[in-house]
Structure formats: C-alpha cells, structure tokens
Image: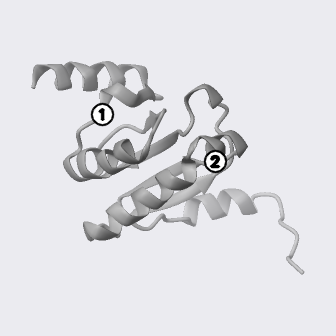
C-alpha cells in the first residue's frame, strides 16, 4: 500500500524531479486520437528516433489534449526551443518532426496548432521567414 502524502510532499517531488534527456514528445492517445492514427504516429516516431540514434528525447503517450479537431496531435519540447503543439500529424509528418524539429531545430509551420508563449511564437516565425 502506498503511503499517504503529506502537505508539501508534491512540491518537494516537483523540486527534486529531474527529467532525463533534452526533450519530450507527448502524443495524444485519447479515443479520437487513436481513431485518427495516433498509434501509427507513435510507432513512426519511435522507429525514427531509434534509427537516428536519438535517446535523449522522451517519447510518451497522454490522454486527450482537448483538440479533437486536429487529431492526431502532440506536443514537442526540445531544449532551447519553445514548446510546440502540432496537429493533423500523419506518419510522414511524424518522421519530419524528428528529422527537422528535433534534429535540426526547425519548426514545421504547416502543422503548428499553437505555441504557448505569445512573444516567443512571433519571434520564431519572423526568424523562420527570414531564412
């Protein structure tokens, strides 16, 4: 049986918790995501990470992100970049997210749903257009 948490235990855990690696990809695996092909997206990303020897990115599954209109969708956090939410991701886009976003730090604007930070988002798109 798990011990009960005391007040402040969660805060201590958060303070001491260290994620391994330099990034994280979380794929929405709610019912609508799975129906739209999220399992295929997960498998493609898993294979592409492995094929490219990338082991510092955590690939995970999460429940519904509430964006059923653009399933399959996922969030990508890579060190030195803003968090990006991609939508309408198929196997080809999943492969590109690894080879372009993760490996080259290029945001794939065609499938970006949103970036949580307003000013960072504007600056990223300006930089991408300047290239």
Residue at point 64% right, 47% down? 34
Query: Which of the pair 70/2 is nearer the observer?
Result: 70
Mark sitting earlier along the chain (1/2):
2
Which residue lies under the disc numbered 2?
A: 34
Disc 2 residue crowd, few under 14, some 14–19, many 20+, Cα 10 Å: some
For the N terminus, which image quadrant?
Answer: bottom right
For the C terminus, which image quadrant?
Answer: top left
Total marks placed: 2
Q: Residue furthest left?
A: 131
Residue at point 45% right, 35% down? 86
Q: Quick one: SS at disc 2? A: helix
Q: Is residue 100 left or right of residue 77?
A: left
Residue 123 spot, x, y in % from top left: 26, 22
Q: Colour scheme used in the picture? A: one colour
Q: Residue furthest bottom?
A: 1
Residue 38 spot, x, y in % from top left: 56, 48
Residue 13 spot, x, y in % from top left: 64, 64
Q: Is residue 10 left or right of residue 47?
A: right
Quadrant of the image occupied by residue 36: top right
In this rendering, the answer to whether 125 lies above or below 72 is: above
Which residue lies under the disc numbered 1?
A: 108
Q: Quick one: SS at disc 1? A: loop
In this rendering, the answer to whether 53 lies above or below 119 is: below
Residue at point 43% right, 68% down? 20
Query: Which of the pair 14/78 is nearer the observer?
Result: 78
């Amino acid at each position: 049986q798990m011990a009960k948490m005391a007040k402040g235990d969660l805060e201590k855990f958060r303070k001491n918790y260290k994620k391994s690696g330099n990034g994280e990809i979380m794929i929405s695996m709610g019912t609508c995501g799975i129906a739209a092909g999220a399992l295929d997206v997960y498998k493609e990303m898993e294979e592409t990470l492995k094929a490219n020897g990338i082991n510092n990115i955590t690939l995970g599954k999460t429940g519904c992100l509430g964006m059923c209109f653009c399933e399959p969708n996922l969030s990508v956090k890579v060190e030195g970049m803003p968090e990006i939410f991609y939508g309408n991701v198929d196997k080809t886009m999943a492969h590109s997210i690894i080879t372009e976003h993760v490996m080259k730090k290029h945001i794939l604007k065609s499938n970006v749903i949103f970036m949580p930070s307003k000013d960072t988002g504007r600056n990223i798109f300006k930089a991408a257009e300047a290239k």
